[in-house]
Image (cartoon, rainbow, N blue to C red):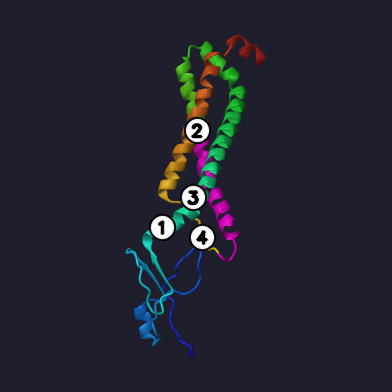
Amino acid sequence: DKWVNTTIDKIHADPISQGFIMSADKLEDIDLNYTPTSIVTEKHVNESYDGVKAANSMSDMTGSWDELTESMWLLIYILIFFASLLAVIVLYNLGLLSFTEIEREIATLKVLGFKTSALRKLLLTQNLWFTAIGFILGLPVGYAILAIMWESSGDSFYILPSISLTNLLLTAVITFALSIIVNLMFSRKIKKLDMVESLKSGE
């Protein structure tokens, strides 16, 4: 029944609910009545209290949240699997294209006496450099796509895109591991490379 002027000192990002959050001490400072209507506790509450509409335990709330996010995690795992599969296909095709382009150079190096292990290391170094460049360029692009996805979720949800150091390291490990696996696929091609045919093809 009256207007109260106060200052918002912090922004609280809640992904689901919207509104203002104020402490009991602050309510008393501006002469408003603090009346709790729900309880969140570590203990199990069986009794009913006047004016309290709900009493929730932390275990029940975390259990409900786990059930809610279970299907979401399944979707995330599926996306990770197909993203890894796509990465293998793309890296393999790029590696095959690169191998075809330098096939004559590899044959020339083999004729000059370079061992297969040295050529494998050379090809691995090249692929790792390409992977590193793609990883660095992909970070801002991925962050921008993530921001667009969260912004399009509607006004009822407020989720800020964030990339933690753990996620960054895990992504780097997966990306470079896939690159090394793809590089191992070309090891047989280097070993079975027909030097005569490769050198003739360049004439």
Percent position (x, y) of residue 147? 55, 56
Q: Is residue 117 visible?
A: yes
User: Disc 4 or disc 2, which is closer to the eye?
Assistant: 4
Residue with the mark numbered 1 = 62
Decide which of 12, 93 is in the foreground and name it. Answer: 12
Q: Magenta residues: mostly which secondary structure?
A: helix
The amino acid type of the residue labelled 2 equals: Leu
Secondary structure of the residue carrying numbered label 3: helix
Query: Label 4: few (<14), some or many (≥20) within 10 Å?
Result: some
Decide which of 86, 90 is in the foreground and name it. Answer: 86
Q: Residue at x 51, y 64 (%)?
A: 16
The amino acid type of the residue labelled 3 equals: Glu
User: Disc 1 or disc 2, which is closer to the eye?
Assistant: 1
Total numbered labels placed on residues in the image: 4
Q: Tell me the distance, in whole angstroms, between the alpha carbons under discs 3 and 1.
A: 12 Å
Disc with the residue nearer the chain's start (3 vs 4): 3
Decide which of 73, 203 is in the foreground and name it. Answer: 73
Q: Tell me the distance, in whole angstroms, between the alpha carbons under discs 4 and 2.
A: 30 Å
In which quadrant of the rendered view does residue 91 lie? top right
Looking at the rendering, the stretch of residues picked out in magenta corresponds to 128-156
In which quadrant of the rendered view does residue 9 lie? bottom left
Q: Tell me the distance, in whole angstroms, between the alpha carbons under discs 1 and 2.
A: 35 Å
Residue with the mark numbered 3 = 70
Label pair 3/1, CB-CB below 8 angstroms: no
Residue with the mark numbered 2 = 178
